[in-house]
Image (cartoon, rainbow, N blue to C red):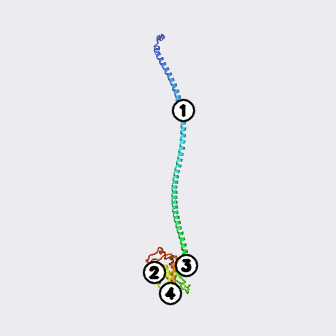
Amino acid sequence: MQGISNGENPISKTMAGHRPSFERRISNFCERKTGASASFSRCLHSSRAVSDDLLASLEKLDKLKDKHREGQANLVEALSVKTRNSARYTAMTTDLATKRARCEQIKKVISDKKNKVDECTTVISKCLHALEACEEKLRKGQSEKENLDSAIAWYQKALGLQVLVGEGVKFIFNKIDSTNPEKEYSFTVRLDNDKYNLLQCDPLVEGIDDLLKEVNETNDFFRFVRVMRGKFATSNFSAVTAVSVTQTSVSGNTSLITESAPVESSPATPSVAKTGAKSKKGLKTPTSSIRRSARLQN
């Protein structure tokens, strides 16, 4: 107790010995505390800045999200529009292909119509040429008919010839008998299978079979008619004197026929009158093939 009272306490001495160390430690701790506090303040300020940046970033992120949602909506709408446009394009492509096919069909139809028009034009042109040829033939036929009518009129007036068509072709003559000019002489001929057949002869004349054979060989029907008229004229007379007079008359009539009558004035039918006879050698003229007219047939 005395040592403690005299100030010689060992704990105090120890504590006094350690006091500088503790003070240094405390001083270091205070410095560290101050540094830590400053560092904490700096960290706090830094955290606040980061927090502010984070909040700004979050706001930007929200805005970006909004823009993203808006972009998605726009994208969906754009995809919808694209889908509609694609469907419309497909429909337009199909319609265009259909119209192209239709155009090709129309072009083909137009080409066919054009070809038909060309064919019709050709046919019409041919028909016009044929019509012109027919009109020319008609004019020639009318001219020939006029010539034939004049020839028939001449024969009727000069020789009293009449031609009747029935079962065959009947040739009637008068003005043969000078004592009876109205007396009629006739014969009827029919053409069967390109062969002349005598159906009737009034009056009968001599040598008729030879005449038929000759006309079938030569096809000279015009001469046959002339000879038949001569036969009728000859058969009209019985006396020798009368026969001589008759022969002179027939010779005169024959010269009239051969010299005065026109070529178309054959006593046969028009188709017979227009044709030529065979030559003595058996050759036909160019028109001999049409001489045997169907009018001589039934």
For the residues bearing labels 1 and 2, Cβ distance under 8 angstroms = no
Of labels 4 and 2, earlier in sequence is 2
Marks 4,2: beta carbons within 8 A: no
Is the residue marked by circle 1 packed among few (<14), some (14-19), or many (20+) residues within 10 Å?
A: few
Residue that badge 3 annotates: 154
Element type at marker 3?
A: helix
Question: Disc 3 vs disc 2: which is toward the camera?
Answer: 3
Task: State the residue position of label 4.
Answer: 244
- Tell me the number on the disc at residue 56: 1
Q: Position of residue 174 (x, y in %)?
A: 54, 83
Residue 262 at x, y = what percent? 52, 76
Compared with 145, 57 (above or below) is: above
Within 10 Å of the Cα at label 3, are there few (<14), some (14-19), or many (20+) other Cα atoms? some
Who comes first in sequence, dot 1 or dot 4?
Answer: 1
Looking at marks 1 and 2 on the same chain, the residue that comes earlier in the sequence is marked by 1
Position above or below: 296 against 27:
below
- The foreground one among 191 and 154 is 154
Q: Residues within 10 Å of mark 2 (few under 14, many from 20)?
A: some
Asked which secondary structure carries label 4, the reply is: helix
Residue identified by numbered label 2? 214
The amino acid type found where label 3 is placed reads: Trp
> Would you place residue 211 above or below residue 58 in this image?
below
Instruction: Check whether the beta carbons of the residues at disc 3 and disc 1 lie within 8 A of each other.
Output: no
Mark 1–mark 4 Cα distance, whole angstroms, equals: 162 Å
**Mark 1 in CB contact with mark 4 (< 8 angstroms):** no
Q: CA distance from mark 3 to mark 1?
A: 139 Å
